Protein backbone atom coordinates (compact mmCIF):
# COMPACT_ATOMS: atom_id res chain seq x y z
CA UNK A 1 0.00 0.00 0.00
CA UNK A 2 1.41 3.34 -1.05
CA UNK A 3 0.28 6.37 1.00
CA UNK A 4 0.66 9.81 -0.54
CA UNK A 5 -0.04 12.88 1.63
CA UNK A 6 -0.66 16.16 -0.22
CA UNK A 7 -1.67 19.68 0.77
CA UNK A 8 -5.32 19.86 -0.23
CA UNK A 9 -8.19 18.33 -2.21
CA UNK A 10 -7.05 19.91 -5.47
CA UNK A 11 -3.61 18.31 -5.26
CA UNK A 12 -5.20 14.99 -4.28
CA UNK A 13 -7.47 15.22 -7.35
CA UNK A 14 -4.54 15.96 -9.63
CA UNK A 15 -2.47 13.05 -8.35
CA UNK A 16 -5.33 10.56 -8.67
CA UNK A 17 -6.20 11.85 -12.16
CA UNK A 18 -2.56 11.43 -13.18
CA UNK A 19 -2.80 7.72 -12.29
CA UNK A 20 -5.96 7.40 -14.44
CA UNK A 21 -4.32 9.28 -17.31
CA UNK A 22 -1.26 7.01 -17.17
CA UNK A 23 -3.49 3.92 -17.36
CA UNK A 24 -5.46 5.34 -20.32
CA UNK A 25 -2.33 6.30 -22.24
CA UNK A 26 -0.90 2.82 -21.76
CA UNK A 27 -4.23 1.10 -22.47
CA UNK A 28 -6.72 3.27 -24.39
CA UNK A 29 -9.53 0.72 -23.94
CA UNK A 30 -9.05 0.61 -20.16
CA UNK A 31 -11.97 -0.34 -17.93
CA UNK A 32 -12.41 2.48 -15.40
CA UNK A 33 -13.94 1.92 -11.98
CA UNK A 34 -16.01 4.97 -11.07
CA UNK A 35 -17.18 6.27 -7.69
CA UNK A 36 -19.64 8.89 -6.49
CA UNK A 37 -19.45 11.21 -3.49
CA UNK A 38 -17.67 14.52 -3.10
CA UNK A 39 -14.15 13.08 -2.77
CA UNK A 40 -13.72 12.01 -6.43
CA UNK A 41 -15.02 15.36 -7.77
CA UNK A 42 -11.58 17.03 -8.01
CA UNK A 43 -10.37 13.87 -9.80
CA UNK A 44 -13.15 14.20 -12.40
CA UNK A 45 -12.48 17.96 -12.69
CA UNK A 46 -8.84 17.24 -13.50
CA UNK A 47 -9.72 14.44 -15.96
CA UNK A 48 -12.12 16.84 -17.73
CA UNK A 49 -9.30 19.40 -17.91
CA UNK A 50 -6.82 16.83 -19.25
CA UNK A 51 -9.39 15.86 -21.89
CA UNK A 52 -10.12 19.46 -22.92
CA UNK A 53 -6.59 20.84 -22.80
CA UNK A 54 -4.35 17.87 -23.48
CA UNK A 55 -6.64 15.66 -25.54
CA UNK A 56 -6.74 12.78 -23.05
CA UNK A 57 -8.82 10.29 -25.03
CA UNK A 58 -11.62 8.23 -23.44
CA UNK A 59 -13.20 7.12 -26.72
CA UNK A 60 -12.20 3.47 -26.33
CA UNK A 61 -12.62 3.29 -22.54
CA UNK A 62 -15.54 1.89 -20.58
CA UNK A 63 -16.66 2.39 -17.00
CA UNK A 64 -18.40 0.63 -14.13
CA UNK A 65 -19.90 2.47 -11.17
CA UNK A 66 -19.39 1.02 -7.71
CA UNK A 67 -22.94 1.20 -6.48
CA UNK A 68 -26.51 2.45 -6.91
CA UNK A 69 -29.51 3.24 -4.73
CA UNK A 70 -32.44 0.84 -4.90
CA UNK A 71 -35.71 2.31 -6.11
CA UNK A 72 -34.67 5.71 -7.45
CA UNK A 73 -35.72 6.35 -11.06
CA UNK A 74 -32.66 6.11 -13.36
CA UNK A 75 -33.05 9.79 -14.29
CA UNK A 76 -33.40 10.96 -10.65
CA UNK A 77 -30.68 13.61 -10.21
CA UNK A 78 -29.25 11.72 -7.22
CA UNK A 79 -29.27 8.22 -8.70
CA UNK A 80 -25.62 7.27 -8.97
CA UNK A 81 -26.07 6.66 -12.70
CA UNK A 82 -27.07 10.36 -13.03
CA UNK A 83 -24.27 11.53 -10.74
CA UNK A 84 -21.60 9.63 -12.71
CA UNK A 85 -23.02 11.01 -15.97
CA UNK A 86 -23.08 14.58 -14.65
CA UNK A 87 -19.76 14.60 -12.76
CA UNK A 88 -17.70 12.54 -15.18
CA UNK A 89 -19.08 10.89 -18.33
CA UNK A 90 -20.69 13.98 -19.89
CA UNK A 91 -17.43 15.95 -19.49
CA UNK A 92 -15.14 13.63 -21.46
CA UNK A 93 -15.47 11.72 -24.75
CA UNK A 94 -16.36 8.34 -23.22
CA UNK A 95 -19.14 6.40 -24.97
CA UNK A 96 -22.00 6.81 -22.45
CA UNK A 97 -23.45 3.45 -23.51
CA UNK A 98 -20.28 1.89 -22.13
CA UNK A 99 -20.67 3.46 -18.67
CA UNK A 100 -22.54 0.98 -16.51
CA UNK A 101 -24.25 1.06 -13.10
CA UNK A 102 -25.99 -1.67 -11.13
CA UNK A 103 -29.72 -1.67 -11.95
CA UNK A 104 -31.37 -0.49 -8.75
CA UNK A 105 -34.78 -0.52 -10.47
CA UNK A 106 -34.70 -4.18 -11.47
CA UNK A 107 -37.61 -6.36 -10.39
CA UNK A 108 -35.16 -9.14 -9.56
CA UNK A 109 -32.36 -7.35 -7.73
CA UNK A 110 -30.32 -10.50 -7.13
CA UNK A 111 -30.30 -11.25 -10.84
CA UNK A 112 -29.27 -7.63 -11.51
CA UNK A 113 -26.30 -8.07 -9.14
CA UNK A 114 -25.23 -11.30 -10.84
CA UNK A 115 -25.57 -9.63 -14.26
CA UNK A 116 -23.38 -6.75 -13.09
CA UNK A 117 -20.63 -9.12 -11.90
CA UNK A 118 -20.81 -10.93 -15.25
CA UNK A 119 -20.58 -7.64 -17.18
CA UNK A 120 -17.44 -6.59 -15.29
CA UNK A 121 -15.88 -9.97 -15.99
CA UNK A 122 -16.89 -9.89 -19.67
CA UNK A 123 -15.22 -6.47 -19.99
CA UNK A 124 -11.98 -8.03 -18.74
CA UNK A 125 -12.10 -6.66 -15.18
CA UNK A 126 -11.47 -3.16 -13.87
CA UNK A 127 -8.04 -1.72 -14.72
CA UNK A 128 -8.12 1.22 -12.34
CA UNK A 129 -10.68 1.93 -9.63
CA UNK A 130 -11.24 5.27 -7.93
CA UNK A 131 -12.56 4.97 -4.38
CA UNK A 132 -13.72 7.34 -1.67
CA UNK A 133 -14.16 6.23 1.92
CA UNK A 134 -17.15 6.60 4.25
CA UNK A 135 -16.68 8.02 7.75
CA UNK A 136 -17.16 4.47 9.05
CA UNK A 137 -14.50 3.08 6.69
CA UNK A 138 -16.91 1.79 4.05
CA UNK A 139 -15.92 1.51 0.39
CA UNK A 140 -18.64 1.44 -2.25
CA UNK A 141 -21.57 0.82 0.08
CA UNK A 142 -19.91 -2.04 1.94
CA UNK A 143 -20.85 -1.03 5.45
CA UNK A 144 -19.02 -2.29 8.57
CA UNK A 145 -19.29 -6.08 9.04
CA UNK A 146 -19.54 -6.68 5.29
CA UNK A 147 -17.93 -9.92 4.20
CA UNK A 148 -14.45 -9.14 2.90
CA UNK A 149 -15.05 -11.75 0.16
CA UNK A 150 -18.45 -10.35 -0.88
CA UNK A 151 -19.60 -9.86 -4.48
CA UNK A 152 -22.14 -7.37 -5.88
CA UNK A 153 -25.27 -7.58 -3.72
CA UNK A 154 -28.08 -5.75 -1.94
CA UNK A 155 -27.13 -3.90 1.26
CA UNK A 156 -29.06 -1.97 3.87
CA UNK A 157 -27.53 1.41 4.71
CA UNK A 158 -26.62 2.30 8.28
CA UNK A 159 -28.35 5.39 9.71
CA UNK A 160 -25.01 7.25 9.81
CA UNK A 161 -24.49 6.73 6.07
CA UNK A 162 -28.05 7.87 5.33
CA UNK A 163 -27.37 10.97 7.47
CA UNK A 164 -24.03 11.57 5.69
CA UNK A 165 -25.77 11.36 2.30
CA UNK A 166 -28.91 13.33 3.27
CA UNK A 167 -27.17 16.52 2.09
CA UNK A 168 -27.79 15.43 -1.49
CA UNK A 169 -31.56 15.09 -0.94
CA UNK A 170 -34.29 17.47 0.29
CA UNK A 171 -34.64 15.49 3.52
CA UNK A 172 -33.28 12.32 5.10
CA UNK A 173 -36.64 10.62 4.48
CA UNK A 174 -35.84 10.67 0.76
CA UNK A 175 -32.54 8.78 1.18
CA UNK A 176 -33.17 5.16 0.14
CA UNK A 177 -32.59 2.46 2.75
CA UNK A 178 -31.25 -0.09 0.28
CA UNK A 179 -28.49 -0.09 -2.30
CA UNK A 180 -26.72 -2.39 -4.72
CA UNK A 181 -22.97 -2.34 -4.32
CA UNK A 182 -19.97 -4.09 -5.77
CA UNK A 183 -18.70 -6.41 -3.06
CA UNK A 184 -15.40 -6.07 -1.27
CA UNK A 185 -14.12 -9.10 -3.19
CA UNK A 186 -15.22 -7.46 -6.45
CA UNK A 187 -13.39 -4.22 -5.64
CA UNK A 188 -10.26 -6.16 -4.60
CA UNK A 189 -10.05 -7.62 -8.13
CA UNK A 190 -9.44 -4.21 -9.72
CA UNK A 191 -5.84 -4.19 -10.94
CA UNK A 192 -5.06 -0.80 -9.41
CA UNK A 193 -7.08 0.85 -6.65
CA UNK A 194 -6.71 4.59 -6.01
CA UNK A 195 -8.48 5.74 -2.83
CA UNK A 196 -8.86 9.47 -2.21
CA UNK A 197 -9.86 11.07 1.11
CA UNK A 198 -9.87 14.69 2.15
CA UNK A 199 -10.86 16.63 5.26
CA UNK A 200 -10.65 16.00 8.99
CA UNK A 201 -13.94 14.03 9.06
CA UNK A 202 -12.10 11.22 7.25
CA UNK A 203 -9.06 11.16 9.59
CA UNK A 204 -10.33 8.31 11.76
CA UNK A 205 -11.35 6.17 8.77
CA UNK A 206 -7.97 6.80 7.09
CA UNK A 207 -6.21 5.78 10.31
CA UNK A 208 -8.16 2.49 10.31
CA UNK A 209 -7.48 1.98 6.61
CA UNK A 210 -3.71 2.50 6.81
CA UNK A 211 -2.68 1.63 10.36
CA UNK A 212 -5.53 -0.36 11.82
CA UNK A 213 -5.81 -4.14 11.86
CA UNK A 214 -7.51 -5.61 8.79
CA UNK A 215 -11.09 -5.88 9.94
CA UNK A 216 -14.56 -5.92 8.47
CA UNK A 217 -15.40 -3.19 11.00
CA UNK A 218 -13.29 -0.84 8.86
CA UNK A 219 -13.84 -2.41 5.46
CA UNK A 220 -11.26 -0.23 3.67
CA UNK A 221 -8.49 -1.81 5.79
CA UNK A 222 -8.70 -4.85 3.47
CA UNK A 223 -6.82 -2.73 0.94
CA UNK A 224 -3.71 -3.53 2.99
CA UNK A 225 -3.90 -6.89 1.18
CA UNK A 226 -4.29 -5.36 -2.30
CA UNK A 227 -1.24 -5.82 -4.53
CA UNK A 228 -1.54 -2.28 -5.91
CA UNK A 229 -3.38 0.21 -3.71
CA UNK A 230 -2.53 3.91 -3.80
CA UNK A 231 -4.00 5.97 -0.95
CA UNK A 232 -3.97 9.70 -1.70
CA UNK A 233 -5.04 11.97 1.16
CA UNK A 234 -4.74 15.61 2.15
CA UNK A 235 -3.06 16.74 5.37
CA UNK A 236 -6.36 16.96 7.29
CA UNK A 237 -7.37 13.40 6.39
CA UNK A 238 -3.84 12.25 7.33
CA UNK A 239 -3.93 13.99 10.72
CA UNK A 240 -4.44 10.76 12.73
CA UNK A 241 -1.62 8.86 11.03
C1 LIG B 1 -21.09 7.09 -0.38
C2 LIG B 1 -20.54 6.32 -1.57
C3 LIG B 1 -19.06 5.99 -1.38
C4 LIG B 1 -18.31 7.24 -0.97
C5 LIG B 1 -18.88 7.78 0.33
C6 LIG B 1 -18.14 9.03 0.84
O1 LIG B 1 -21.40 6.28 0.68
N1 LIG B 1 -21.26 5.11 -1.79
O2 LIG B 1 -18.55 5.46 -2.59
O3 LIG B 1 -16.94 6.94 -0.81
O4 LIG B 1 -20.24 8.13 0.08
O5 LIG B 1 -18.58 10.16 0.17
P1 LIG B 1 -17.89 11.55 0.22
O6 LIG B 1 -16.71 11.46 -0.68
O7 LIG B 1 -18.91 12.52 -0.30
O8 LIG B 1 -17.50 11.81 1.63
Image (spheres, rainbow, N blue to C red):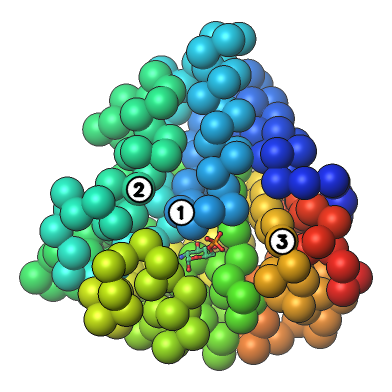
State how far apart marks 2 and 3 are (Cα): 21 Å
Residue under label 1:
36
Q: Quadrant of residue 84?
A: top left
Instruction: Give the residue at x 25% y 33%.
Output: 97
In the rendered image of this protein, does residue 43 appear above or below residue 229? above
Relative to 238, say whether 36 is above or below: above
Residue identified by numbered label 3: 199
Q: Position of residue 40 (x, y in %)?
A: 56, 47
Residue 119 seen in this snapshot: no
**Which residue matches tag 2?**
83
- Looking at marks 2 and 3 on the same chain, the residue that comes earlier in the sequence is marked by 2
Q: How far separated are the C-alphas under marks 1 and 3?
A: 17 Å
Q: Residue at x 17, y 49 (%)?
A: 75
Res 102 visible: yes
Q: Indicate if the residue with disc 3 has its beta carbon within 8 Å of ligand 1.
A: yes
Label 2 – label 1 distance at C-alpha: 7 Å
Q: Nearer the viewer, mark 2 or mark 3?
A: 3
Would you say 220 lies left or right of 134 here? right
- Above or below, comparing residue 92 to residue 68 in the picture: above
- In depth, the one of 223 and 124 nearer the eye is 223
Question: Is 136 left, or right, of 209 in this rendering?
Answer: left
Give the crowd class for mark 1: few <14, some 14-19, many >=20 residues within 10 Å: many
Neighbor class of circle 3 (other Cα within 10 Å; few <14, some 14-19, many 20+) is some
Residue 133 picture location, percent across and down: 61, 66
Look at 55% across and 32% down and name the residue there: 45
Q: Quadrant of the N terminus?
A: bottom right
The x, y position of residue 192, in whole percent, is 67, 47
Q: Is mark 1 within 8 Å of ligand 1?
A: yes
Amino acid sequence: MEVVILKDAREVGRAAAAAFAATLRRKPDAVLGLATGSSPLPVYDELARLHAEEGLDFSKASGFALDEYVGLPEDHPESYASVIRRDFASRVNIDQAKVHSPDGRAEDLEAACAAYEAAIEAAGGVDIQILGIGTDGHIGFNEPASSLASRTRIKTLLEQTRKDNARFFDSIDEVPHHVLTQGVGTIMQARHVVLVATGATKAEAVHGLVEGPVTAMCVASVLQFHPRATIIVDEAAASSL
